[in-house]
Image (cartoon, rainbow, N blue to C red):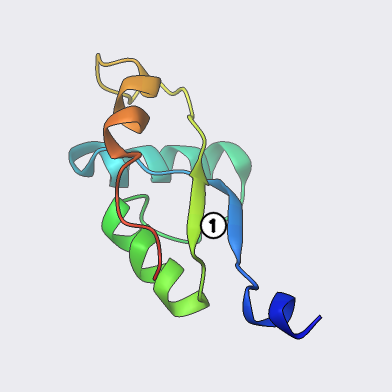
């Protein structure tokens, strides 16, 4: 099983990102609704940084519907961000 040990990958199966221009407002809104602090600022840049720090190879992005979301449907935003680099 040595080869399996060397192939270990970490995948985050629950992540959210938002467009930069609304990320702060949206994360603040969600923190107030949930009553818990967010792990990050909700931007793609911060998600990639936290992935690097934790050794996560890829994150599965999930949509969140809020009134702060732009007119684009959330799945369009996620689709356009789906190609950001996976971890080496």
Residue at the spot x=49%, y=29% of the render?
Answer: 64
Q: Residues within 10 Å of mark 1 (few under 14, many from 20)?
A: few
In the visual, does 20 lie left or right of 28?
left
Picture coordinates of residue 42, whole percent (x, y): 37, 50
Q: Which quadrant holds residue 87? A: bottom left
Of residues 84 and 38, the one nearer the viewer is: 84
Q: Nearer the viewer, residue 71 or 5?
A: 5
In what quadrant of the picture does the N terminus appear? bottom right
Residue drawn at the location 30% of the way across and 39% of the way down: 81
Q: Which residue is mark 1?
A: 37
Of all residues, the one furthest to the right in this rendering is: 1
18 w.r.t. 7: above or below: above
At 38% from the left and 22% from the top, the residue drawn is 74
Query: Tag 1, which secondary structure?
Result: loop
Asked whether 60 or 73 is in front, the reply is 60
- Examine the image and state in which quarter residue 19 appears: top left
* Total numbered labels placed on residues in the image: 1
Question: Residue 53 appears at what percent x and percent y?
Answer: 44, 78
Residue 66 pos. (x, y %): 43, 23
Q: Quadrant of the image for the C terminus?
A: bottom left
Place of residue 32 in the rendered image (x, y in percent of width and height, measured from the top left): 52, 42
Q: Is residue 28 above or below residue 75?
A: below
- 47 is higher (above) or lower (below) than 50: above
Task: Say whether residue 71 is left or right of residue 31.
Answer: left
């Amino acid at each position: 099983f040595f080869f399996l040990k060397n192939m270990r990958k970490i995948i985050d199966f629950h992540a959210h990102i938002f467009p930069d221009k609304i990320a702060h407002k949206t994360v603040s809104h969600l923190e107030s609704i949930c009553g818990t602090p967010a792990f990050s600022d909700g931007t793609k840049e911060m998600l990639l940084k936290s992935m690097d720090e934790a050794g996560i190879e890829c994150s599965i992005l999930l949509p969140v519907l809020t009134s702060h979301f732009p007119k684009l449907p959330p799945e369009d935003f996620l689709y356009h961000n789906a190609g950001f680099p996976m971890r080496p």
